Image: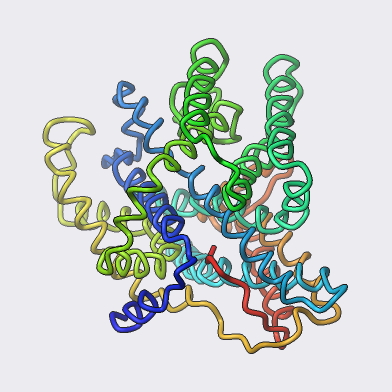
């Protein structure tokens, strides 16, 4: 691995935006660290540190960095799709869309499907053996929660071409349209009490943040300090005077969450974060010119998705081992609990590294041979596969693997979905995407997803 990382780092084109790669790794790393820190595990169950110590909730305004990842995604998708358009035969834009969608989906879905199939098999075995209680049951329910991110990202990939065209025509106006739609949804939700309308903001809020990446790709975020200040002030006003909670992550038992579904307050929080990271761009770029620093970023990018998928597995594995060894689990937020934090983090990081070593091969992009951007019939297959995967992974993130055979369901928008149904949709969608990709290879990536 070391030599390949060194070669990749050394072959980096001078025009590549290294800061984007750093933001991708840093944002996922912050999410992983946040999950490890927030978990308040006791022999009786799993709570949230931010609920135990509400005074820590303002920290989410710095540490809830998922908007940064989606912002980076918009930047990368704009570059990749435009690169394919420049190479297309005349009049072949539809096949370029299929090739773009297929390449991005394969990169996301291969490590995701390994995660889903391994955990699905483990959950089935646990239930057949009569287990599933205690921490094991909690793990089976919660370990799939990060999959919501994969589902949203799949939607972003699918909507990139039409939204990029809107961006090229209207610029900031396209972002304003999405932000206005998010505002309208919250008005209908909170003022008019319209049922289920809030779920539309899974699209409007996150696609608006994604649209900021397009603006960044074209150098149109010229006043990051203004963007950060406006976002911070507006988010603060919405929380102070509106129906929005302080925390920018979901809290157990809260009637309203800023995350699920996302709110206008979270969108303003995203504006603040995007402006803030843009202000750090120049000093970070100088740091990334150092070969050792850049090699570390390249290495981390190569395994980031695998680490993200398996980090909760590692965390619950650490707690399970501590309980099996009859180690004391201190009361969350107590002095003993804080003293044990470094050990738990080190163990979780070590176990995550082991899981990455086992599964990182599935994150590598499939080798593709140069060819036509798409094949006849590949487009509908890819679109159907993307839709099934989107519904499947979102459903699985909500229902989990607990009670796999018991008919347990969760509400996906307004439709009940079970774990077997979610796995079946995800698997069918992935197989369709893989089938559509055979023999139609195109290299699709200046910046990886």
Looking at the picture, the colour scheme in use is rainbow
Name the residue: 68% across, 83% down: 441
**Numbered label tally:** 0
Report the front residue among 171 and 31: 171
Name the residue: 88% across, 73% down: 91
Q: Quadrant of the N terminus?
A: bottom left
Name the residue: 73% across, 36% down: 173
Q: Is residue 130 visible?
A: no
Q: Is residue 314 left or right of residue 262?
A: left
Q: How far from the left and from the top, in percent, is residue 239? A: 50, 17
Q: Is residue 347 visible?
A: yes
Q: 440 above or below 57? A: below
Q: 115 above or below 334? A: below
Q: How far from the left and from the top, in percent, is residue 49? A: 31, 33
Name the residue: 38% across, 62% down: 307
Q: How far from the left and from the top, in percent, is residue 86? A: 72, 71
Q: Is residue 156 left or right of residue 325?
A: right
Q: How far from the left and from the top, in percent, is residue 154? A: 64, 57
Report the front residue among 262 and 388: 262
Image quarter for residue 243?
Answer: top right
Report the front residue among 219 and 375: 219
Q: Quadrant of the C terminus?
A: bottom right
């Amino acid at each position: 691995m070391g030599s390949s990382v060194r070669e990749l780092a050394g072959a980096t084109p001078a025009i590549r935006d290294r800061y984007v790669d750093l933001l991708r790794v840093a944002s996922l790393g912050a999410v992983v660290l946040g999950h490890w820190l927030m978990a308040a595990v006791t022999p009786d169950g799993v709570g949230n540190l931010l609920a135990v110590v509400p005074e820590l909730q303002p920290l989410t305004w710095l540490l809830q960095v998922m908007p940064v990842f989606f912002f980076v995604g918009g930047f990368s998708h704009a570059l990749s799709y435009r690169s394919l358009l420049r190479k297309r035969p005349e009049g072949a834009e539809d096949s370029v869309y299929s090739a773009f969608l297929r390449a991005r989906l394969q990169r996301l879905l291969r490590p995701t499907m390994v995660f889903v199939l391994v955990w699905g098999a483990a959950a089935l075995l646990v239930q057949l053996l009569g287990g599933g209680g205690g921490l094991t049951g909690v793990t089976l329910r919660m370990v799939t929660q990060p999959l919501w991110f994969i589902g949203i990202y799949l939607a972003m990939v699918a909507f990139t071409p039409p939204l990029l065209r809107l961006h090229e025509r209207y610029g900031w106006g396209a972002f304003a349209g999405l932000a206005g739609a998010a505002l309208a949804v919250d008005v209908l939700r909170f003022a008019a009490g319209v049922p289920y309308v809030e779920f539309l903001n899974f699209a409007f809020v996150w696609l608006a943040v994604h649209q900021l990446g397009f603006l960044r790709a074209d150098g149109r975020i010229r006043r990051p300090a203004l963007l950060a200040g406006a976002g911070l002030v507006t988010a603060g006003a919405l929380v102070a005077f509106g129906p929005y909670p302080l925390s920018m992550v979901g809290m157990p038992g809260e009637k309203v969450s800023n995350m699920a579904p996302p709110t206008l307050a979270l969108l303003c929080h995203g504006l603040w974060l995007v402006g803030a990271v843009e202000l750090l761009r120049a000093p970070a770029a100088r740091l990334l010119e150092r070969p050792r620093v850049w090699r570390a970023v390249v290495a981390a990018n190569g395994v980031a998705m695998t680490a993200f998928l398996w980090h909760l597995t590692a965390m619950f594995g650490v707690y399970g081992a501590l309980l099996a060894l009859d180690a004391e689990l201190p009361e969350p937020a107590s002095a003993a609990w804080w003293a044990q934090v470094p050990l738990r983090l080190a163990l979780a990081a070590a176990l995550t590294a082991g899981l990455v070593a086992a599964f990182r091969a599935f994150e590598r992009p499939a080798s593709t041979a140069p060819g036509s951007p798409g094949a006849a019939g590949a487009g509908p297959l890819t679109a159907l596969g993307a839709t099934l995967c989107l519904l499947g992974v979102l459903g699985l993130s909500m229902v989990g693997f607990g009670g796999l055979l018991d008919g347990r369901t969760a509400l996906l928008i307004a439709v009940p979905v079970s774990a077997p149904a979610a796995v079946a949709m995800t698997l069918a969608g992935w197989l369709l995407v893989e089938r559509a990709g055979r023999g139609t290879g195109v290299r699709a990536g200046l910046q990886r997803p």
